[in-house]
């Protein structure tokens, strides 16, 4: 096997992060001491300027399903809207179809669909179907912009003044075609505009996309109203009820980035689930399937389900980012990084009617420790099950299949005179080719972190081979497209670059890191 190195990790590079990142290099803290602390967050928290409601009062909303306008064709308008997120206050949003989250698309495996997006927002946008096996032309490359009406092409900026000769720019609308030749799973779609992904998602540009097939339908898992999509985000609110975000340019037109205290990531002090603050859901005493997405910019969660008398319920994981596991994995605590998805079953049948089960975040403090609650309202029949074998179609790549090993360091650094987040020592440049691989090749990638970095590969799923030279953790099971690197950690993944030829990305999904150049190009030839 051939060995590739793209930027090694040095002790100086790992510790020279600055006060905002919490590793305290300036005080002379040793590497081992700094890493032993393993801070639970990377980023700084905004504090809301309005009174916050008590938890578990607002009913859990369920995002509406988007209806096709014709066979396998959908239309979505990106537009400004307002919603009552905090009781009694109106919050301006950027939305898909006027709602936050955007409407959910449900589709069938192997049945292509086309989604036409119309941009009525004041800035250019890009749409990426996260986790989709998508041809490059519809993958949502960050410079493939959809311009709003009246936006002159001559003023299109491609990241700190850089030019992308391969950018495909359209005016007002764009058709995205998704073949959906992939395992059934929970995907999500969001804005991916270069340098401005973080504030655009923060303002509301995110929605769910569920892929189904007959094999999964036949398993007998909880379904219907006992299957709940849960998009978890954190936000902060200004005094007028608007979303607070520390953009250097609040118009999101020219200057990207955030002030110094928030360079490591922007955290909010309000936890929203499906757009509602700390909601509550009335449940039967039965099994529920929870399709969980962490759509936060930078916040990590460690979830647990706890009854009011202190008993922890099992979180039975049946799926990962890219679909069902081979067999169920039972957790009491489930860590979830930005952009990761977990498919879990929780059994409320042993919870007395009238009791409450809280979904808590062990990495939170104060109000960010609560996520949502379930109130068990009634006894009910339940013919669902969790079969011992969930799937038999997971790939079985081995190290010996790999044609090479590549190494990438994800770390802070300097770019164009300011702070940046780098991969292999380089900031993102859309005109540069970083990795070229052949269609069908299997490769092992070694990913190394300074602080928390959830690393996402476009187009392909992967298996986690090791963490810090040891076997993967239980929550690493299955086929993933995003892996959480913890501070100072090295993780090995293996994948086959199949599907389509073209230009794709891999990047950190801490959205502030992504906007500050922590992306790289992947060319499949």
Image (tube, rainbow, N blue to C red):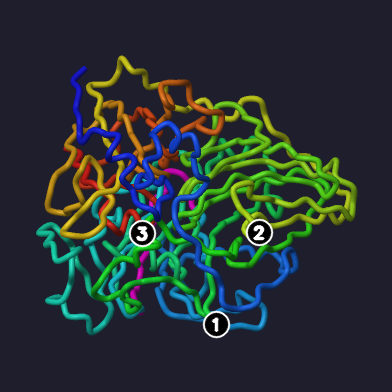
Residue at position x 23%, y 23% in the image: 404
The image quadrant of residue 396 is top left
The dominant secondary structure in magenta is strand
> Is the residue marked by circle 2 packed among few (<14), some (14-19), or many (20+) residues within 10 Å?
few
Give the residue at mark 3: 263
Tag of residue 366: 2
Q: For numbered disc 1, what is the local secondary structure?
A: loop
Q: Nearer the viewer, residue 230 or 35?
A: 35
How far separated are the C-alphas under marks 1 and 3?
Answer: 23 Å
Q: Which residue is disc 1 drawn over?
A: 239
Quarter that holds the N terminus: top left
Per the rendered image, the range of residues in magenta is: 107-120
Q: Residue at x 33, y 60 (%)?
A: 192
Residue 381 image point, x, y percent = 85, 45
Q: Position of residue 503 (x, y in %)?
A: 20, 47
Image position of 200 with respect to 209: above or below: below
Asked if residue 304 lies left or right of residue 393, the reply is: right
């Amino acid at each position: 096997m051939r060995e590739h190195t793209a930027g090694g990790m040095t002790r100086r590079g790992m510790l020279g992060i600055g006060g905002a990142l919490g590793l305290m290099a300036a005080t002379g803290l040793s590497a081992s001491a700094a890493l032993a602390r393993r801070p639970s967050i990377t980023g700084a928290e905004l504090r809301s300027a309005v009174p916050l409601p008590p938890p578990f009062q607002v009913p859990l909303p369920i995002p509406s399903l988007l209806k096709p306008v014709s066979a396998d064709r959908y239309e979505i308008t990106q537009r400004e809207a307002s919603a009552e997120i905090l009781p009694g206050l109106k919050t301006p949003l950027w939305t898909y179809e006027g709602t936050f989250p955007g409407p959910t698309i449900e589709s069938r495996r192997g049945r292509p669909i086309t989604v036409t997006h119309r941009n009525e927002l004041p800035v250019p946008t890009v749409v990426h179907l996260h986790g989709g096996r998508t041809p490059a032309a519809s993958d949502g490359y960050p410079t493939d912009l959809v311009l709003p009406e009246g936006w002159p092409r001559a003023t299109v900026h491609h990241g700190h003044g850089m030019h992308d000769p391969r950018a495909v720019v359209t005016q007002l609308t764009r058709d995205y075609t998704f073949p959906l030749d992939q395992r059934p799973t929970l995907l999500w779609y969001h804005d991916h505009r270069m340098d401005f992904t973080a504030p655009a998602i923060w303002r509301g540009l995110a929605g769910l996309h569920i892929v189904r097939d007959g094999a999964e339908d036949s398993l007998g898992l909880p379904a219907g109203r006992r299957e709940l999509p849960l998009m978890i985000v954190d936000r902060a609110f200004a005094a007028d009820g608007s979303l607070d975000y520390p953009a250097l340019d609040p118009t999101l037109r020219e200057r990207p980035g955030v002030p110094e205290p928030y360079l490591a990531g922007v955290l909010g002090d309000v936890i929203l689930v499906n757009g509602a603050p700390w909601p509550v859901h009335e449940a039967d005493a039965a099994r529920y399937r929870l399709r969980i997405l962490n759509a936060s910019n930078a916040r990590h969660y460690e979830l647990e389900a706890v009854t009011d008398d202190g008993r922890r319920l099992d979180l039975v994981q049946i799926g990962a980012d890219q679909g069902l596991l081979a067999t169920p994995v039972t957790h009491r605590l489930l860590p979830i990084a930005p952009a990761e998805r977990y498919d879990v079953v929780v059994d409320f049948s042993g919870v007395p009617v009238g009791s409450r089960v809280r979904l808590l975040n062990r990495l939170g403090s104060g109000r960010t420790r609560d996520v949502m609650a379930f109130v068990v309202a009634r006894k009910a029949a339940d013919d669902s099950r969790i079969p011992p074998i969930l799937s038999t179609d997971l790939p079985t790549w081995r190290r010996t299949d790999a044609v090479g090993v590549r190494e990438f360091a994800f770390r802070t650094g300097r770019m164009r005179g300011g702070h940046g987040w780098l991969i292999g020592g380089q900031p993102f440049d859309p005109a540069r080719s970083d990795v070229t691989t052949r269609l069908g090749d299997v490769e092992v990638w070694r990913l190394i972190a300074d602080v928390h970095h959830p690393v996402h590969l476009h187009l392909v799923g992967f298996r986690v081979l090791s963490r810090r030279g040891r076997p993967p953790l239980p929550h690493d099971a299955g086929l993933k497209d995003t892996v959480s690197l913890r501070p100072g950690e090295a993780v090995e993944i293996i994948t086959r670059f199949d599907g389509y030829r073209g230009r794709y990305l891999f990047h950190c999904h801490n959205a502030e890191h992504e906007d500050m150049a922590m992306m790289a190009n992947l060319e499949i030839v």
